[in-house]
Image: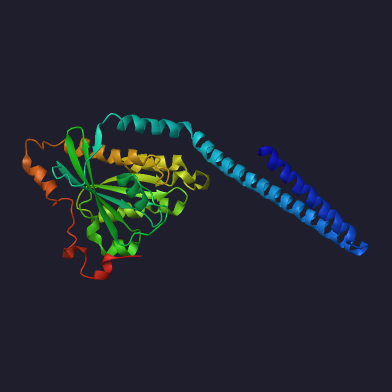
Amino acid sequence: MEDSSQNTNTNSEIEKDDKNLSENNNLNDDEKVKKNEIKEGEEKMGEKNNNEDKDSHIKNNIIDNNNKNEKFENKTVKQEQSEDEIKYNNELTEKVGKYNIEKMPDNYDKENANFKVLFLGDPGVGKSSLVLRGITKKYNSLYKPTVGFDLLNHIVKINDKVIKLQIWDTCGQEEFSMCNQSLFKNVTIAIMVYSIIKKETFENIKKWVSRVKDLSKENSIFFLVGNKSDLDSQREVTFSEGKTYGNENFKFFVETSSKSEYNVDILFKEIVIYLYENKIRTESYEEDDSKIGEYIDGSQSTINLNSQDLGSDKKCLRCC
C-alpha cells in the first residue's frame, strides 16, 4: 500500500510539472517575461520578510540582554554596599534573631499589652506600602495615596508575651495632620519615614518629629526609616547621612524597601523587641494586673474614631 501511495504522489508531481511546462510553451515572450517578473518579485518579498524576521529577532535579543544587564547592575549595586552598611545590617539581623517572634491570628484577644504605633512622613515616601508589606507580606505596585488614615492591628507573640500593635498609617498632607491633632496623642512609637531618592522628605523629618512632641501626651519613642532602597541608583540621601542622623536623634534607624521586602521584617520585629524590652519587662505586669488593664482597654494608646476628639469639622477627617 505504501509503494502504491508513493507512486501516486510521484505521478501527480510529474503531471504538475508537465502542465506548467505546457503552459509556459503556450505563452508568448511578453507573457513569459511578466510571469518571470512576478516570480522574482515574490521571491524578493520572501527574502525581505525573512530579513525583517531576523532583524526583529536581533532586536529582541538586544532588549533581553539589556534587561539582563539592568538586573545584573542592580544586583551589583547591592553587592557593593559599604562595609559599614553590611556590618550594620548584619548586627540588626543577629539582634532580632535572638528573639522568638511569632505573628498571632487577627482575632486573638488575650494580649498582654496594647501599643499605638504611628507611621509619619511626607506624601509618596511609601508609608502605606511599608505597613502593608510588614503586616500582610504583600506589595501593591499601584500607588494610591492614603485618604485620611488607616488603622491596622498587628498581634505578635514575643517569647512568652503577646503584644497588640495598633498601626496608624497617616496621609502626609499637613492640612490633615493639623486638624486631626488627636491622632498624635499617646503615641508609643512614631516611625518617621523618608524616601532615599528625595532629599526634601529627609529634611522634613524634623517637622514631623516636632509635631508629635508637641501633641503627644506620652514620651513618644522615634524610629527613623529610609525607604525605597531598591532605587539605590537614584538616591539623594546616602546611607551614612541617614545612619548618622538616626543614631544621633532616634532610638533606631534602618533602610528598607517595600518592593523587595529589604529589612521590612527587621523593622517590625525591632518595634516589638523595643516594646518588650522597655515597656513589658521593665514593669511588673504579672504583679500589678491594673497595668495590663491600662493598656488593654486602650485608655493610653487608643483613639475612639466616633469621639469628638477627631474634630467637629467632618472635612478634617479626610485629605487627598
State the residue lying farthest toward the right.
29
Q: Is residue 300 left or right of residue 79?
A: left
Q: Is residue 236 left or right of residue 160?
A: right
Q: Quadrant of residue 64?
A: top right
Task: Work out whether residue 281 can be spotted.
Answer: no
The structure residue drawn at horizontal position 29% and vertical position 56%, both measured from the top left corner, is: 211
Q: How many marks?
A: 0
The structure residue drawn at horizontal position 69% and vertical position 50%, both measured from the top left corner, is: 53
The structure residue drawn at horizontal position 87% and vertical position 57%, both measured from the top left corner, is: 24
Q: 184 above or below 76?
A: below
Residue 205 placement (x, y as % from top left): 37, 51
Q: Is residue 119 left or right of residue 304?
A: right
Task: Work out whether residue 135 can be spotted.
Answer: yes
For this rendering, which residue is in front, 158 or 193? 158
For this rendering, which residue is in front, 113 or 248? 113
The structure residue drawn at horizontal position 85% and vertical position 54%, both measured from the top left corner, is: 21
In which quadrant of the rendered image does the C terminus lie? bottom left
Residue 306 placement (x, y as % from top left): 17, 63
Residue 238 placement (x, y as % from top left): 47, 43
